[in-house]
Image (tube, helix red, strand yellow):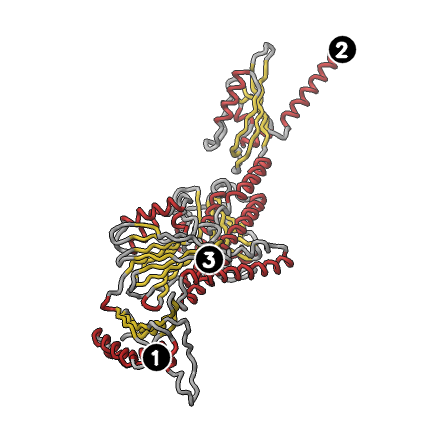
Amino acid sequence: MKPAGGGEDERDDEKRALVEEAFRQASFSMSVFDDRQRYRRMNQTACEVMGVSEGALLGQVFPYGVPPDVDQEGTVVALREVARTGKPTHYESYTRAPSGIREHAWNLELWPILDESGEVCAVGMAGFDSSEQHWARQRLAVLDEASVSIGRSLDLERTAEELTELVVPRFADFASVDLLEPVMRGEETEPGPLDATVVLRRVAHLSTEEGTPEAVIRLGATDSYPPYSPPARALHTGQTVLSGSGEPDFDRWIASAPARAEKMRGETVTSLMAVPLIARGSTLGVAMLMRTRPDQFNQDDFTLARELASRAALCVDNARRYTRERNTALALQQSMKPRGSRSRAVEIASRYLPADTRAGVGGDWFDVIPLSGARVGLVVGDVVGHGIQACATMGRLRTAVQTLADVDLPPDELLAHLDDLVLRLGGEAENGGRAGASGTGSGGGEAGETGATCLYAVYDPVSRTLTAATAGHPPPVLVLPDGETRQLEMVAGPVLGVGGLPFEAAEADVPEGSLIALFSDGLIEATNHDPDLGTEKLRRILATAPEALEDCCDQLLSGLLPERPPDDVALVLARTKGLDADHVHEWNLAADPAKVADARSLATAQLDAWGLSEAGFVTELVVSELVTNAIRYGAEPIQLRLIYDRTLICEVSDASSTSPHLRRARTFDEGGRGLLLVAQLTRSWGTRYTATGKTIWAEQALD
């Protein structure tokens, strides 16, 4: 019979054997080191992680057996610290396993092992592979960052760059974004997948290596992708395509272009993903993510890439839509810019700069309008708001100003009519908004908010006067020939669209050689938003500006605007000229039909003096008709004036406000044919009203 003590020993041996098996078969890595960091014990999982047997490591100092490219400095420090202090610690590292190629996240628990005397004789270490949790956190972090880092601007190139900067180097070693040509122009693309060879433009690329040596296509260049290439397959199927070195279609694609084959010689692409960029059912382009690191893309990477591409595609599509609206607005504004006018009245230089803002192009405009009597109309306006609607309103107002100027309305009356038009536009928009609101539940309240500012000025080179009226717009700045600068004193009229308030015109003598500067508020409020300070700075620049008007415009823009103007800017510079007595002659006439012949003689003699005898026949007919009408239907005083500019202008003024009308005379009518002949023989004719009556004028072209 065995003694009782033998049973206890047996049970202890069984416990030790059980503990040994639990240590050896643990699913996580367990190791024991002595106080000098030498291997004492390793379980089976630890040997698999290291890629060597326990016998090969026993007695060696850690990190023996770890490849040089796997950093273990932090683990060594932790082992030494536990051996020195006798206190357990926790350490996290992010390295690949010595036996593997993919990087892992490790949670290491280290604790002291004490001998019978309570001294540290060894250190135990348990390693837990938390890579899946780590990568899940990383993916969530990338998606969270994508929501704030992609699409911060409405610029196509910058949006593509933001995607590449997000994924390199944390997710890929090289990334590129290529877009379809219509997308770059802001146009819609054909819905659905793309067939055959695809032409794409490189918008952005980034690499972990300096200089981006993998890039075969330079930024801004285009390339054709054959149907079997990964990008074309992704665009055709609408699905992410995985490829890499050794895959037949990938190798065939690389070899199809000598430049690409030369670039990729010696490079091993372990994994490449071509992810289509699709938003709102439209295919926009493709993002390519490439790895040369040992670990390939896995299923979780696929999911992350699709999510990133989906978010980036929406941002690219928003940028495309903004580009389309901006290009449309710019084209509309460009089409409405004045093409220049030749006149003895003024020398003109102008600038228009669209705002660099997400709000889009604004409704600033300017115009130079030739008027009768060798005069010229100068206009600057600004419609409230930005985008296509503001540009459309601007176009209607500009057309209205041209029409009203053509009937020679004074500046204050012209703005009154323009104010009525803006009120009608606002009413139309408001009614349209209400109609739309019933169907969609959106936006009726702001639809009617149409407003604009405008300055209209008329310069007369004969009298050398400037007459102007403003509707909430900054007054012009004058630079006189002696260098004095001053802002034209004007009564600030209400903004267009208010209604019910009058406008007042201001008049100033402007010597020949003076400079008139008209501008929108974007020029003087761009820096500090204070129009008074901006106007004062503008006056200082004009006082020392170069003589050449084009150089003067450039100096004003560079001196007053930041690199990215927050609002549209319109600028018109006009240097005045005068028509001297040799080019203008006036005669007062009595209201006597017998004086018509005298008027013809005076006009003929003046034409001979100007060397314009060949224009005598038409001029005699025009003078005869206009003077006869003034004597017959008008009132004294009657005045005849000839102006020799780039054209020959004949004007007859009287004190009556009754205007002649062009009509077609019947067969037996004794009159009614004179104005018809005038209209057919001259380039243009018309009537303008003055404070004392009216002036009928006719303009002849000169060879």
Q: Which residue is mark 1?
A: 628
Confirm or deny contact between disc 2 and disc 1 (CB under 8 A).
no
**Between marks 2 and 1, how big is the CA–CA gap?**
154 Å
Q: Residue at x 67, y 21 (%)?
A: 17
| Image-quadrant location for residue 34 | top right
Q: Badge 3, how many Cα within 10 Å: few under 14, some, many 20+?
A: few
Q: Nearer the viewer, residue 30 or 200?
A: 200
User: Given the image, on which type of amino acid does mark 2 rest?
Assistant: Pro
Asked which secondary structure carries label 1, the reply is helix
Asked which secondary structure carries label 2, the reply is loop
Q: Nearer the viewer, mark 1 or mark 3?
A: 1
Instruction: Identify the image quadrant of the N terminus.
Output: top right
State the image coordinates of residue 500 (x, y, percent, origin top left).
51, 57
State the image coordinates of residue 536 (x, y, percent, origin top left).
34, 46
Of callouts 1 and 3, which one flags the residue occurring earlier in the amino acid sequence?
3
Asked whether the viewer can see residue 217, the reply is no
Residue 502 is marked as 3
Residue 3 is marked as 2
Q: Badge 2, how many Cα within 10 Å: few under 14, some, many 20+?
A: few
User: Given the image, on which type of amino acid does mark 1 rest?
Assistant: Thr
| Image-quadrant location for residue 221 | bottom left
